Amino acid sequence: MDFIVSTVELFHHGGWVMYPLLACSVLVVAIGAERFMYYRRTCRANENTAQKVLNLAKEQKWQEIENFCAARRCFISDVLLNGLKYRSCPMAMKESFEEIISVRANGLKRNLNYLDTIVTMAPLLGLLGTVIGMIGSFKVLDVSGDNPALITGGVGEALIATATGLCVAVLALIVHSYFSNRLDSVLTDVENVCTFLISRARGKEQ
C-alpha cells in the first residue's frame, strides 16, 4: 500500500507531462500484447511448415505441398498457396510470391511505427517536464532567497519526468526490437522457401 501511495505521489510531482507519458506506456503494452497474439496466431507453425515443404520440394511433390499448406494455415503456407498455382511458369510464380509477401508483410509491421515514434517522443516529453519543473524551481529561488532546500527539492521533482520518459522509451525500444527481429526472421524464412521452390520449378538442383 505504501508503495502505491509513493508511486502516486511521484507521478503527481512529475507534472502534467506524466499523463501523456502514462498514455505512451499503456500504448506500448497494448501494442506488445496485440503483436504477440498476432505473431502467435499467424507464425507459430512457420518453422515446421517450412521444413516440411522443403523436404517435399526436394522430391517435387507439388500436390502434396499444396495439400499440406492448405491444411496447415500460417504465414508461410498462405504465401506458398498463392504462388504454387503458377508453378508451371516459374517467372509468374516468383512474381506472385513477391506480391503476396509484400502484402502480408504489412500485417506483420502493423503498429510497429507507433513504437518507433514513442521511443523518440517519450524522452523529449520527459525533458520538457524537467525544463518546466526547473523553471518553477527558479521562480521559487526568486521568492525564497535563503532557502536552498526548496530549490533542490524542486529540481529532484523535475527530474522525475525525465526518468519516466527514459523508462517508457526503453520499454518501447525493447518491444520494437523484439518484433522487428521476429519480422526479419519470418520474412527470411519465407523468402528462403520461396527461392527453393522457384529453383525446383525450374528444374535446378540446389
Image: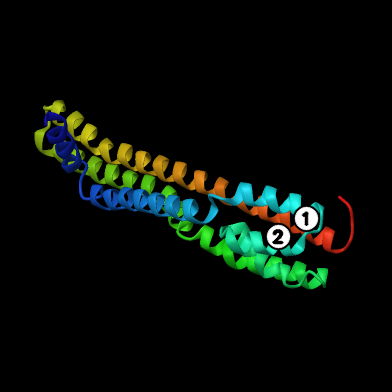
The percent position of residue 131, horizontal first and vertical second, equals 29, 44
Q: Is residue 36 left or right of residue 71?
A: left
Residue that numbered label 2 is attached to: 65
Question: Circles 2 and 1: CB distance less than 8 Å?
Answer: yes
Three-letter amino acid code at disc 1?
Answer: Ala
Residue 165, placed above or below residue 57: above
Residue in the image at 32% along x and 36% along y:
163
Looking at the image, which is closer to me, 24 or 14?
24
Q: Give the mark, 2 or 1, whose residue is nearer the N terminus.
A: 1
Residue 69's place in the image compared with 159, above or below, is below
Q: Looking at the figure, which quarter contains the N terminus? A: top left
**Residue 20 placement (x, y as % from top left):** 28, 53
Q: Nearer the viewer, residue 122 or 116?
A: 116
Find disc 1 in the rendering and name its residue. 57
Instruction: Tell me, for residue 170, which label it has, or none.
Output: none
Which quadrant of the figure has residue 133?
Answer: top left
How far across and how far down the image is residue 57, in percent?
77, 55
What percent of the width, then of the height, locates residue 154? Answer: 19, 35
Colour scheme: rainbow
* Quarter assignment of residue 143: top left
- Furthest residue in direction right, as rendered: 204
